[in-house]
Amino acid sequence: SNNNGGGGSGTSDPTINSLPGKNGNVKVLNYALTLEILEADLYRQALNLASGRPLNDNDGKLRDASAYVMAPGVGNLGAQSAAGFAYLRDFAFVEAAHRDFLRTAILGLGDTPVSPNAKGYQFGKAVAPNLRAILRALLPLEETGTRAYLGAAPFFVNFESAATKNLIKAAVGIYSTEARHSAALHYVLESDIGPNGTEAGVPSNSRVSLSGSTLPYSDQGLGDTFEYFSTPASVVAAIQPLIVK
């Protein structure tokens, strides 16, 4: 039972329990923060690449949004190039806002946020300086983040408390935003916006179930009625190539 968040020390998930935090809710927030730090940094690098800037331009900090203009030769998505770059720019700032919100929330709970990886983050392989390659590199990360929030939701504790309800509202708000990001990237890349169980580079094909059985519905074989989720352990394993060791 996940009912030990007020004074207890953790949740029923060993991966989340391994994270710092005085109770289960802070551990869940630090799990989310771990992912948002990664996403924000890789989006920042991707935006710099698309803008013709060094990956760690401005000492690894975002400039004002107006400073980012698509570099010549980057826009290879035809009529979708302008939208693709706008999504990339806007989402970079959204991920940074998610990161900063979670840090502030953890500090507000009197606890310590996890720190960024000291050696930084990298894409699993070199990314060509064009929008198609850049957005394709980001897409598995974005979808993994979406599924990670859904997979972590059951591990909040003290569900009956007002504080936990507020945290869940915030988490669902971020989750829905990540899902919109994923759909937008799919759209400009002209691929299935999903959700689907065959996303390249995304862990887990699990979907919501009831008493161990699939829910009693028919999606006529489309497979897009419920979002898939990923367990914390599978997410942590999936992001390892993105963390500089």
Image (tube, rainbow, N blue to C red):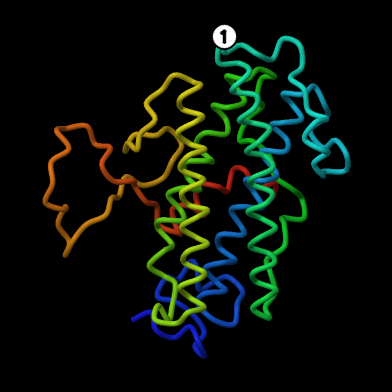
Total labels: the figure holds 1
Apparent side of residue 238 relative to residue 63 in the rendered image (left or right): left
Residue 95 at x, y percent in the picture = 64, 47
Of residue 16 and residue 163, the one placed in the foreground of this image is 163
Determine crowd level at label 1: few under 14, some 14-19, many 20+ residues with C-alpha closer than 10 A. Answer: few
Q: At 50% across and 48% down in the image, what residue appears?
A: 145
* Vertical position of residue 167 compared to residue 65: above or below: below
Q: At 70% across and 46% down in the image, what residue appears?
A: 244
Of residue 76 and residue 242, the one placed in the foreground of this image is 76
Q: Residue furthest right?
A: 58
Residue 107 at x, y percent in the picture = 70, 73
Q: Mark 1 falls on what kind of element?
A: helix
Of residue 81 and residue 122, the one placed in the foreground of this image is 81
* Vertical position of residue 199 compared to residue 78: above or below: below
- Give the quadrant of residue 224: top left
Residue 94 at x, y percent in the picture = 64, 45
Q: At 69% across and 15% down in the image, what residue appears?
A: 74
Name the amino acid type tagged 1. Answer: Gly
- Give the quadrant of residue 122: top right
Q: At 34% across and 38% down in the image, what residue appears?
A: 195
Quarter that holds the N terminus: bottom left
Residue 156 at x, y percent in the picture = 44, 72
**Location of mark 1 (residue):** 78
